[in-house]
Image (tube, rainbow, N blue to C red):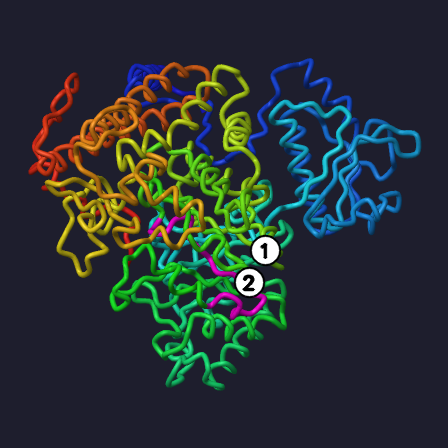
């Protein structure tokens, strides 16, 4: 049909009007919205390098016809085609300059003895000659091992590393590497800041989103081998046949990627959905109910991983309700799972009013006496610090305290206390700090990492969990830069000795750009970001001074709640005589839970690392810090430095305009502008609040905080996301 001239003219005017508004409407032609994560496989611009890579991969020989082998074929076709503009040729015949992938069961020339000690997940990548032909061989004892090896090989290409003379052998240092989703069945995500849950329980089991497959791909690419689908504040309905059918559908999708499914369970489920009068773990009928429930699950899902349990914590039911110990509760579930090879991850996040003991000490007091009383398939899951995922905490004293009981690390990937999904905070430095800290449990070198991986005490099983930051937002994590926290968690769960900077640089190459300016600038931002955030939120060891309930923004004034240890004033103890919580021998003596010399170092304000000063000591406002300033002046300077550094981060990010995709650039730009506003709000509110106790002036050279304390205290955020229900 011919379009009339008038219509064509109007159409042209319409198009021109759109472009005239482009400065407001923001047209993004590259359309990089963050969905592809670190698996973008952008074309390698360096033609010489591209040619060198292609020389090694004339064709590809992938042995086997399993679902996993077919996934490897799909991944290579997509990745090599995109990065190298290479039409991937799959051949069943051995050829020169070929990428060969297989197991001893699928390729008879793979030496089984060379793979001893690699288990089911380890792999080798070697440049070698086979039948006189130069090949790159990725071999493993299982197809999942070859999948992990394939992602490692692709990572070499993505980071523009040499693939000449390869001789790589990798095995995971930790057995159980899981994401904990705090997702409810109504799709609300507790402490989630990237939209609704990605699990659409209503449409499952029949409607299987592509996002489920891409989730599994992403996890496999960084070595995560398990996912806990639901909130630790568990709904008992997850164990009913209606929902187990839906869980089965997800498990089927995830299986070829080496990703096992786990479930959080409510301890009182026998009463709530089983019609029983009790959930006492020593009751024979209760034990039988759990045994039959485990049998039912494994009939549907033969590789089901096991249960995660939050018990006798924050109102959740547990064995304590029946006068039983945590070990007796965990062992009942462990016995039900053991015939199937399942495990129990029993959380140590417990604290109770009736203990009449300072909160940071309670997990140790509860679980230390139970060492050696748990079944072999039980891991006690411990948060990295003794309180609750604060911007900075000392390591939990439980690490190194239970040689007969595996301690499973629990990190928070989502940022409940770190500005949600609008603050750029790379958590790799936090994870590294915790894992490399020396507990001295068996002398020097007894790091938290060695406790967690089981090597320090020769534990038979090891684990690391990360509370997921994933949601239904198109870019998965609400902020493209926060994808790096999912990535670094997986990489450190595989190998906790990897450095945070090494992993950050990998992620930048794979997600943002190969340009040296971008890599260097963004790497500097990421590596400094956590310390910057600590400074504008909780410097010098302050902690738990956030807004009540939602945990959003500053709230050092929070008091008069249901219990003292939910308030801020309980933790900072600010008064005319000084500030800080005395956990030294002269106070509540929490330092006694640590091994010497850590105990001795923490006991004195003169020897403790200054970043933990106010965590363990209540000190005068005039106490002289290492800078030579008084404690008051140093505290204020840190708050000001943190806020100023966020402004510098924003300025630094702006220099990258035009060097990375427009959408990526603008998403981060907008978030940094929000972070800048909130950093100054944290600074002003906290400085004004603490000044009323110090009764000292703002240090010379620093401007008086904007606004009044009353204005900051009056701020309300009733619909802040991620609150519990």
Report the span colored magenta.
370-388
How dense is the environment of label 1, judged by Cα within 10 Å: few (below 14), some, or many (20 and up)? some
Numbered circle sitting on residue 404: 2
Q: Is residue 13 magenta?
A: no
Residue 111: x percent and y percent? 86, 45
SS of the residue at dot 2?
Answer: loop
Quadrant position of residue 398: bottom left
Quadrant position of residue 271: bottom left
Residue 15 seen in this snapshot: yes
Quarter of the image containing the N terminus? top left
Q: Residue at x 55, y 75 (%)?
A: 336
Residue 210: x percent and y percent? 53, 46
Q: Which residue is mark 1?
A: 457
Secondary structure mainly formed by the magenta segment: loop
Lateral position of residue 704 relative to residue 545, left or right: left
Task: Relative to 437, say whether 356 is above or below.
Answer: below
């Amino acid at each position: 049909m011919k379009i009339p001239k008038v219509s064509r003219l109007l159409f042209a005017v319409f198009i021109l009007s759109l472009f005239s508004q482009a400065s407001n409407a923001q047209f993004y032609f590259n359309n990089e919205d963050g969905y592809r994560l670190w698996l973008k496989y952008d074309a390698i611009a360096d033609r010489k390098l591209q040619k060198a890579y292609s020389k090694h991969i004339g064709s590809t020989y992938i042995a086997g016809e399993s679902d996993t082998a077919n996934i490897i074929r799909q991944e290579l076709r997509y990745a090599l085609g995109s990065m190298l503009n290479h039409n991937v040729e799959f051949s069943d015949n051995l050829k020169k300059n070929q990428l060969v992938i297989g197991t001893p069961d699928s390729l008879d020339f793979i030496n089984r003895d060379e793979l001893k000690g690699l288990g089911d997940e380890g792999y080798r990548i070697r440049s070698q000659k086979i039948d006189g032909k130069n090949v790159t061989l990725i071999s493993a004892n299982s197809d999942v091992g070859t999948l992990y090896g394939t992602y490692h090989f692709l990572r070499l290409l993505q980071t523009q590393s040499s693939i000449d003379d390869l001789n790589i052998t990798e095995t995971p240092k930790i057995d159980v590497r899981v994401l904990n989703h705090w997702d409810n069945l109504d799709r609300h995500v507790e402490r989630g800041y990237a939209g609704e849950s990605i699990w659409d329980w209503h449409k499952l089991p029949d409607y299987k989103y592509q996002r489920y497959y891409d989730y599994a791909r992403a996890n496999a690419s960084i070595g995560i081998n398990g996912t806990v689908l639901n909130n630790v504040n568990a709904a008992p309905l997850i164990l009913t046949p209606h929902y187990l059918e839906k869980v089965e559908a997800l498990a089927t999708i995830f299986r070829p990627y080496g990703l096992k499914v786990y479930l959080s369970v409510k301890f009182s489920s026998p009463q709530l959905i089983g019609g029983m009068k009790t959930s006492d773990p020593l009751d024979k009928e209760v034990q039988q109910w759990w045994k039959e429930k485990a049998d039912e699950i494994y009939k549907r899902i033969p590789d089901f991983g096991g249960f995660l349990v939050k018990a006798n914590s924050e109102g959740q039911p547990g064995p304590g309700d029946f006068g039983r110990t945590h070990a007796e509760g965990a062992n009942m579930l462990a016995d039900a799972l053991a015939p199937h090879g399942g495990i129990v991850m029993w959380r140590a996040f417990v604290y109770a009013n009736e203990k009449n003991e300072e909160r940071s000490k309670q997990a140790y007091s509860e679980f230390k006496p139970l060492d050696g009383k748990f079944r072999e398939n039980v891991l006690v899951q411990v948060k990295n610090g003794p309180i609750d995922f604060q911007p900075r905490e000392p390591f939990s004293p439980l690490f190194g305290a239970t040689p007969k009981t595996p301690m499973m690390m629990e990190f928070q990937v989502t940022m409940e206390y770190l500005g949600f999904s609008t603050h750029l905070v790379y958590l790799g430095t936090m994870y590294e700090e915790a894992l490399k800290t020396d507990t001295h449990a068996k002398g020097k070198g007894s790091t938290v990492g060695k406790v967690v991986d089981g090597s320090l005490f020769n534990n038979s099983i090891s684990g690391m969990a990360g509370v997921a930051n994933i949601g239904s937002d198109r870019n998965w994590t609400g902020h493209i830069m926060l994808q790096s926290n999912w990535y670094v968690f997986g990489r450190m769960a595989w190998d906790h000795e990897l450095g945070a900077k090494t992993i950050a640089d990998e992620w930048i190459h794979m997600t943002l750009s190969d340009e040296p300016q971008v890599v260097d600038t963004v790497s500097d931002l990421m590596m400094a970001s956590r310390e910057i955030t600590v400074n504008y939120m909780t410097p010098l060891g302050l902690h738990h001074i956030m807004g009540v309930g939602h945990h959003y923004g500053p709230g050092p004034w929070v008091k008069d709640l249901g219990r003292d240890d939910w308030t801020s004033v309980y933790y900072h103890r600010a008064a005319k005589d000084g500030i800080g919580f005395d956990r030294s021998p002269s106070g509540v003596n929490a330092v006694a839970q640590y091994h010497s010399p850590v105990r001795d170092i923490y006991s004195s304000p003169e020897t403790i690392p200054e970043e933990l000063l106010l965590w363990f000591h209540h000190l005068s406002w005039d106490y002289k810090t290492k800078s030579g300033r008084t404690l008051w002046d140093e505290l204020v300077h840190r708050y000001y430095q943190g806020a100023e550094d966020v402004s510098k981060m924003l300025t630094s990010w702006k220099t990258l305009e035009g060097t990375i995709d427009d959408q990526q650039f603008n998403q981060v730009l907008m978030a940094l502008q929000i972070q800048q506003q909130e950093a100054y709000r944290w600074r002003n509110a906290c400085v004004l609040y603490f000044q009323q106790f110090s009764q000292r002036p703002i240090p010379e050279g620093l401007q008086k905080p904007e606004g009044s304390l009353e204005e900051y205290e009056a701020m309300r955020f009733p619909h802040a996301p991620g609150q519990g229900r």
